[in-house]
């Protein structure tokens, strides 16, 4: 497989951007090699600058639930942009997308559109602090909430710790407001609430943690978080930027039937354009400016082109059977992978394919379930590195890190899934020798 054009583009990009990229994981550092520069995408396929074709399971890290350049989404974008791309004044399209969302989601009453997931979460945290008049927040090791200062914090050693910054440039004083505990550990959360009584504004969790492996939580654990937050007048934030509209129109709140206080969204709601959103009850949202005194604004927030793309995409998601079909495709892919490894006369005991809805994660572990970041064996990533490279050679594109999940989209065909399973088994045979 020729990579010359991608390699030349990457050399050039390194002169312009730190590490040659505009978001770190794209640089392929965790799998080695150089990133593919993508020329175009259509449906479930992408083509790189050298003309190589791939079946894509990255889907721009989740937003493209209908696949690339979906006709309805592209048409909506074209039709809208002809009339201008942004006004900094309200448009009817914002109402239309809001009606579509609020009319089909029982867990939020009012929303605010922003331009990214990071911005949604950052604003939700400010809202929680403004509403409760408390400063501390509690997050979990292994959950990603974007790159705002308060959240670039990783766990230290004890059961309950203030985090250590996971990035230079984050002041110690910010870190001292963020408590970090392990997932799936009730005692740690209880201890944090005991130690910081009446100080914790919010607990924030990815209810389906999917940014550091797929760390599926027990419903009882999420319910425990709901209850302890209620008892302590602390707000529970579900960060559904990745799983919202992905595992069902009502996301994880609907899947587990748990009512959080604030929910953040992003990725899928923009149809591939930059959109984020946070929502809550009308009462909590009334704290947001200009109604209330929590300030939050955005020049391009709710811009008509992104709204139109979101409307087109979410309208498709609402079709009956949409999510069931995605889930059965995902299960089919997983079954076929194991069928092919059996045909090749091996099924590595430590190969696990964890999944929920149309999200899947390839893990190399002996454990039957993995619920916390600490349970992931960093050394097992050596298998993923080889697997990733071998899959690329066979025309299958996964996000370039073993900690990232894969996404099945509406455009994946049975033929795609069968080809993928065959390639996967072959690539795995090579990877297991790593
Ligand atoms: C992707 C993601 C974010 C950040 O969203 P951006 O649009 O990349 O800023 C935040 N939280 C979760 C759960 C995410 O998956």
Image (cartoon, grey):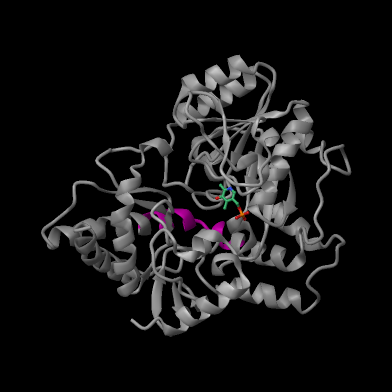
Q: Residue 50 at what x, y percent from top left?
A: 43, 84
- Quadrant into which the N terminus falls: bottom left
Q: Is residue 326 magenta?
A: yes
Q: Judge whether 7 appears above or below 228 on screen.
A: below
Residue at 71% across, 57% down: 115
Q: Is residue 431 magenta?
A: no
* Residue 277 in sight: no
Q: Tell me where the magenta segment starts and ends, as one range.
A: 315-328
- Quadrant into which the C terminus falls: bottom left
Residue situated in front as seen by the camera: 324 or 231: 231
Left or right of 176 in this view: 27: left
Secondary structure of the magenta portion, mostly? helix
Q: Residue 331 at what x, y percent from top left?
A: 33, 54
Left or right of 385 in this view: 126: right
Q: Judge whether 94 appears above or below 281 on screen.
A: below
Q: Judge whether 353 appears above or below 288 on screen.
A: below
Residue 416 lies in what quarter of the image? bottom left
Q: Residue 21 at what x, y percent from top left?
A: 56, 67
Left or right of 326 in this view: 190: right
Residue situated in front as seen by the camera: 213 or 26: 26
Residue at 67% across, 55% down: 116
Q: Residue 73 at what x, y percent from top left?
A: 61, 71
Residue situated in front as seen by the camera: 22 or 84: 22
Residue at 50% across, 59% down: 25
Left or right of 428 in this view: 12: right
């Amino acid at each position: 497989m020729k990579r010359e054009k991608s390699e030349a583009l990457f050399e050039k990009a390194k002169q312009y951007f730190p590490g040659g990229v505009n978001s770190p994981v794209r640089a392929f550092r965790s799998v080695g090699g150089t990133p593919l520069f993508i020329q175009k995408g259509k449906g479930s396929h992408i083509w790189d600058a050298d003309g190589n074709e791939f079946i894509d399971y990255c889907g721009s890290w989740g937003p493209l639930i209908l696949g690339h350049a979906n006709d309805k989404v592209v048409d909506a974008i074209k039709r809208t942009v002809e009339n201008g791309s942004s006004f900094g004044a309200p448009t009817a399209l914002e109402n239309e997308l809001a009606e579509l969302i609020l009319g089909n989601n029982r867990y939020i009453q009012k929303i605010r559109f922003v331009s990214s997931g990071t911005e949604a979460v950052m604003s939700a945290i400010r809202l929680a602090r403004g509403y409760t008049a408390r400063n501390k927040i509690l997050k979990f090791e292994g959950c990603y909430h974007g790159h705002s200062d308060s959240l670039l914090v990783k766990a230290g050693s004890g059961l309950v710790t203030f985090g250590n910054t996971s990035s230079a440039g984050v002041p110690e004083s910010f870190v001292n407001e963020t408590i970090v505990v392990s997932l799936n550990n009730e005692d740690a959360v209880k201890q944090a609430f005991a130690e910081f009584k009446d100080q914790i504004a919010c607990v924030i969790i990815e209810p389906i943690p999917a940014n550091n492996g797929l760390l599926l939580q027990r419903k009882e654990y999420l319910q425990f978080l709901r209850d302890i937050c209620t008892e302590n007048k602390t707000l529970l934030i579900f960060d559904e930027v990745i799983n919202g509209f992905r595992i069902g129109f009502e996301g994880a709140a609907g899947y587990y039937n748990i009512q959080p206080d604030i929910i953040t969204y992003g990725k899928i709601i923009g149809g591939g354009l930059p959109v984020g959103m946070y929502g809550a009850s009308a009462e909590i949202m009334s704290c947001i400016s200009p109604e209330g005194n929590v300030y939050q604004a955005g020049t391009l927030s709710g811009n008509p082109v992104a709204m139109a793309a979101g409307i087109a995409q979410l309208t498709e998601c609402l079709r009956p059977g949409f999510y069931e079909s995605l889930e059965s495709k995902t299960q089919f892919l997983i079954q076929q992978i194991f069928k092919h490894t059996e045909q090749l006369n091996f099924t590595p005991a430590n190969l696990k394919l964890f999944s929920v809805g149309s999200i899947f994660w390839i893990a190399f572990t002996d454990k039957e379930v993995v619920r916390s970041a600490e349970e992931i064996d960093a050394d097992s990533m050596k298998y993923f590195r080889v697997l990733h490279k071998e899959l690329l050679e066979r025309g299958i594109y996964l996000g370039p890190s073993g900690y990232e999940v894969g996404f099945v989209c509406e455009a994946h065909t049975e033929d795609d899934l069968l080809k993928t399973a065959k390639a996967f088994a072959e690539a795995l045979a090579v990877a297991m020798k790593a």
